[in-house]
Amino acid sequence: TFSAWAEIFGDPIAVAALVDRLVHHSEVLVLRGESYRLKGKGKEVLSDGDDR
């Protein structure tokens, strides 16, 4: 979600400006449910997120 971007980038004012420009004249789709790209993969993919 956009609310976590300030923690990731460290500058909430710059993030607000960036998000404003990204979503201006756009539609934000919130998708819920299981990820299609992870379908068929083992549960280890979901639990092993420390490699990034």
Image (spheres, rainbow, N blue to C red):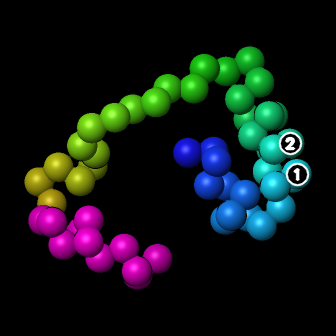
On the image, the x and y values in percent for residue 5 come to 67, 55
Query: What residue is rendered at 66% in x and 65% in y?
Result: 8
Choose between 19 and 13: the one closer to the eye: 13
Residue type indicated by callout 1:
Ile
From what the image shows, is residue 45 above or below residue 20? below
Numbered badge on residue 13: 1
From what the image shows, is residue 29 above or below residue 17? above
Numbered badge on residue 51: none
- Check if mark 2's residue and mark 1's residue have beta carbons within 8 Å: yes
Query: What residue is rendered at 24% in x and 43% in y?
Result: 34
From what the image shows, is residue 35 above or below residue 43? above
Query: What residue is rendered at 57% in x and 26% in y?
Result: 28
Q: Tell me if mark 2 has few (under 14), some (14-19) or many (20+) residues whose alpha carbon lies within 10 angstroms of its own.
A: few
On the image, the x and y values in percent for residue 45 come to 24, 68
Left or right: 41, with 18 as reference point: left
| Residue linked to disc 2 | 17
Q: Is residue 18 magenta?
A: no
For marks 2 and 1, give the one nearer the viewer: 1
